[in-house]
Image: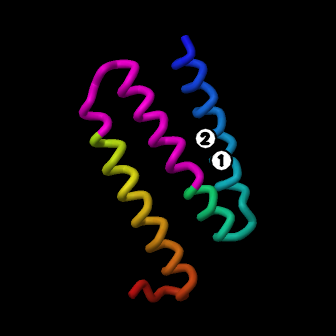
Amino acid sequence: MIDYIAMILLASFAFLILIRIFLGPTIWDRLLGLNLLSPKIIMLIVLYSLMTDRTYLLDVAIVFALLSFVSIIFIARFVQGKGNIL
């Protein structure tokens, strides 16, 4: 029962963050929203994995965490450098 409540709360927080991503006045607000959304999605994947006893989803959560970290870094460097990534 508490698992479902936690998933509903995380999904509602993710929805509010999505609103911030779409309404953010600057690219940095959108990037911060994306940076806030990634852990919520990871927590949802981990909770679902624990609820259904599918341990391979934990590997999916780890890969998603690594990819989201690297993508946030690359997007921030791209925006800051006005197009130059490296």
Q: Amino acid under label 1? A: Ile
Where is 60 relative to 6, above or below? below
Residue positioned most to the left: 56
Quadrant where the image shows the N terminus: top right
Q: Is residue 74 magenta?
A: no
51 on left or right of 17: left
Picture residue at 37% right of the left edge, 50% below the top? 64
Q: Is residue 40 magenta?
A: yes
Q: What range is drawn magenta here?
A: 36-58
State the image coordinates of residue 63 (x, y, percent, origin top left): 31, 50
Q: In this figure, which residue is indicated by the disc labeled 1? A: 17
Where is 11 relative to 31, above or below? above
Residue 14 image label: 2
Considering depth in this image, is 47 or 8 the residue closer to the camera? 47
60 on left or right of 26: left
Secondary structure, magenta segment, majority class: helix
Picture residue at 72% right of the left edge, 61% below the top? 24
Considering depth in this image, is 82 or 54 the residue closer to the camera? 54
Q: Amino acid under label 2? A: Ala
